[in-house]
């Protein structure tokens, strides 16, 4: 065991470096006030309403995701459109 | 002119009460009339760490709400001159503290003391906000660990927006970093955030670095502020921090490896 620990000591896991990088992103977001995307639930609800004007969709077919990054965040909105309903609409 | 200093952190369990006890004791040892107030209503612990739990009769909440005089609630420390403890209530909740009530007590204390140390509860809710509201300076107690650093950053935001100084447009609260539970071995292995990392992120001056030291638990078991224990490394680090708080230039200890003999190294390896 001692020997194993010795090698780990030489190699070093350097998790502190990762911790620092994660913290820098996190703290920058906290400070900008953009950390809590409180508007996302409302956005999702309104999106569904808008889409429903054109296609019948369920709430669960609209997925809103946010990927936070150091320089910018990506807001991803996926709407699942059932082909059958699209066809129905085209036929009207 | 009395100075109000809040000891705060956001995160719980990082060493706020231990630090508030040590620093207030250190200030009193240096001859300054000091009072330390427990703001953690409902979770009274400062009296335990200070070893005065059996002498609590009246508390902070009684003074605010029940017409008890401040002098009846203040407990005079028997080991150190100039040191007084104002315990809090164990049975009430945070709503028992009103801003007007706290202000009245603060004004009375300002007239009698040089330093008023406010031991904040964890969190960022009412209790913590009440503890920091009247502060002139803040000691932000932080562990070299990501959740603690993040919470400290949140508290720094509150210090600059929700304090009396911020509301009145006075000079902002002077915040100092007190990095506790610092384990130099782990820092050197790259397994723990180092002082410089934490300073980079929080961007506030360093009041002190307290090494991880078993004596801290030992002393809290005994009800003895660790600064009174001569043989403790943490105690030494707190003494340095107090000196810096008083404006002295003291070199930072416990942040660089000490020169160790081969025997010492062997003993540590096999421990």
Image (tube, rainbow, N blue to C red):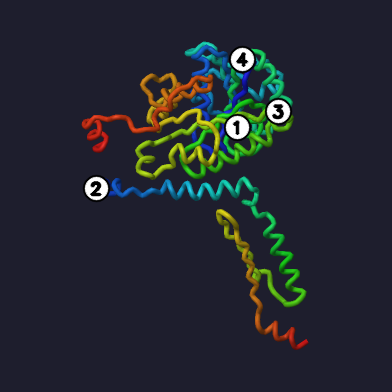
Q: Are marks 4 and 1 in contact (CB under 8 Å)?
A: no
**Real-space Cα separation, disc 3 to disc 2, in angstroms:** 59 Å
Q: Residue at x 22, y 47 (%)?
A: A3
| Mark sitting on residue A1 | 2
Query: Can residue A8 be seen from the camera position used here?
Result: yes
Q: Quadrant of residue A37?
A: bottom right
Q: CA distance from mark 1 to mark 2?
A: 46 Å
Residue drawn at point x = 65 percent, y = 72 percent = A79
**Residue designated by label 3:** B170
Q: Where residue B134 sits: x, y (%)? A: 67, 27
| Whether residue A46 is situated above or below residue B12 in the rendered picture | below
Which residue is denoted by mark 1 in the rendering? B42
Say which element carries label 4.
loop
Above or below — where is B149 with respect to A59? Answer: above
Do tag 3 and tag 1 residues touch (Cβ < 8 Å)? no
3D distance between C-alphas at marks 4 and 1: 26 Å
Asked if marks 1 and 2 touch (Cβ < 8 Å), the reply is: no
Q: Can you give x and y, in whole percent of width and height, for residue B205 in the image?
A: 53, 31
Q: Residue at x 62, y 17 (%)?
A: B73
Give the mark, 3 or 1, whose residue is nearer the N terminus: 1
Q: Residues within 10 Å of mark 4 (few under 14, many from 20)?
A: some
B251 displayed left or right of B176: left
Circle 3 chain: B
């Amino acid at each position: 065991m001692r020997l194993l620990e010795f090698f780990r000591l030489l190699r070093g896991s350097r998790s502190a470096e990762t911790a620092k990088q994660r913290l820098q992103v996190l703290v920058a977001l906290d400070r900008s006030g953009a950390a809590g995307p409180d508007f996302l639930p409302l956005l999702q609800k309104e999106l569904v309403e808008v889409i429903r004007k054109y296609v019948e969709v369920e709430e669960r077919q609209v997925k809103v995701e946010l990927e936070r990054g150091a320089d910018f965040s990506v807001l991803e909105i996926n709407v699942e459109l059932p082909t059958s309903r699209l066809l129905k609409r085209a036929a009207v | 002119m009395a100075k109000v200093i809040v000891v705060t952190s956001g995160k719980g369990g990082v060493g706020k009460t231990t630090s508030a006890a040590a620093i207030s004791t250190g200030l009193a040892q240096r001859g300054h009339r000091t009072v330390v107030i427990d703001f953690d209503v409902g979770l009274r612990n400062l009296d335990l760490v200070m070893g005065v739990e059996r002498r609590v009769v009246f508390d902070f909440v009684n003074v605010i709400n029940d017409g008890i005089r401040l002098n009846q609630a203040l407990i005079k420390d028997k080991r150190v001159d100039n040191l007084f403890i104002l315990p809090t209530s164990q049975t009430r909740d945070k709503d028992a503290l009103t801003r007007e009530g706290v202000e009245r007590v603060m004004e009375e204390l300002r007239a009698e003391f040089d330093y008023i140390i406010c031991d904040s509860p964890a969190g960022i809710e009412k209790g913590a906000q009440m503890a920091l509201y009247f502060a002139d300076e803040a000691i932000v107690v932080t562990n070299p660990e990501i959740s603690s650093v993040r919470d400290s950053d949140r508290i720094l935001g509150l210090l600059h927006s929700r304090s009396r100084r911020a509301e009145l447009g006075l000079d902002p609260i002077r915040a100092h970093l007190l990095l506790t539970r610092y384990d130099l071995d782990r820092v050197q292995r790259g397994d723990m955030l180092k002082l410089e990392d934490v300073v980079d992120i929080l961007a506030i001056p360093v009041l002190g670095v307290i090494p991880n030291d078993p004596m801290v638990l030992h002393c809290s078991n005994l009800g003895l502020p660790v600064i009174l224990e001569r043989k403790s490394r943490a105690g030494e680090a707190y003494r340095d921090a107090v000196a810096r708080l008083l404006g002295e230039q003291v070199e930072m200890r416990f942040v660089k490896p000490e020169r160790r003999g081969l025997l010492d190294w062997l003993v540590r390896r096999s421990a």
